[in-house]
């Protein structure tokens, strides 16, 4: 059996642009992706802290150091520049992998700088 578990999270990233006419996805600064192990084309669930909207999309790599977090395509209607977003990436793990997995999290500041990184506890053996 596989479990869908949190792989990584960008907590309170700030939306820098909402571009409905752009090809769909979310563009994220490569520094933020590296901090938590997210990759281009990974599916992510995005939660908007301002309005409670949640949507699923996939990642485009943004220019390293740009601090861009841009919501593109139809999902751009769920966000406005300045909104704080929680970006969640999940993975499928078997019981053995899930027992030791530690999700990586980056707490993001007002200018999309990484304030702190941490790992959540692993659940341990079932």
Image: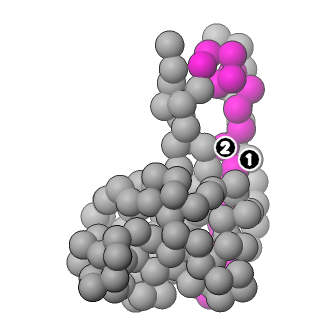
Q: Going 69% across and 50% down the picture, which residue do you hit?
A: 104
Task: Please state if 44 lies on the left or on the right of 113 as rendered.
Answer: left
Q: Is residue 98 above or below residue 38?
A: above
Q: Secondary structure at mark 2?
A: loop
Is residue 87 at least partly visible in the picture?
no
Where residue 117 sits in the image (x, y, percent)?
A: 75, 60
Is residue 27 at least partly visible in the picture?
yes
Where residue 76 sits in the image (x, y, percent)?
A: 30, 77
Q: CA distance from mark 2 to mark 1?
A: 5 Å
Q: Going 51% across and 24% down the picture, which residue do you hit?
A: 3
| Residue in the foreground of this view, choosing between 55 and 107 | 55
Which region of the structure is painted magenta?
94-114
Q: Which mark is residue 103?
A: 2
Where residue 103 sits in the image (x, y, percent)?
A: 67, 43
Q: Secondary structure at mark 1?
A: strand
Q: Is residue 114 above or below residue 125?
A: below
Q: Which mark is residue 73?
A: none
């Amino acid at each position: 059996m596989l479990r869908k578990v949190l792989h990584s999270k960008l907590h309170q990233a700030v939306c820098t642009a909402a571009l409905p006419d752009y090809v769909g996805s979310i563009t994220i600064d490569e520094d933020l992706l590296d901090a938590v192990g997210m990759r281009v084309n990974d599916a992510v669930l995005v939660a908007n802290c301002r309005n409670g909207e949640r949507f699923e999309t996939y990642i485009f790599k943004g220019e390293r150091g740009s601090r861009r977090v841009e919501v593109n395509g139809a999902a751009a209607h769920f966000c406005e520049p300045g909104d704080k977003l929680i970006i969640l990436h999940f993975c499928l793990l078997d019981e053995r992998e899930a027992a030791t997995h530690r999700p990586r999290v980056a707490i993001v500041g007002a200018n999309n700088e990484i304030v702190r990184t941490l790992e959540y506890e692993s659940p341990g053996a079932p």
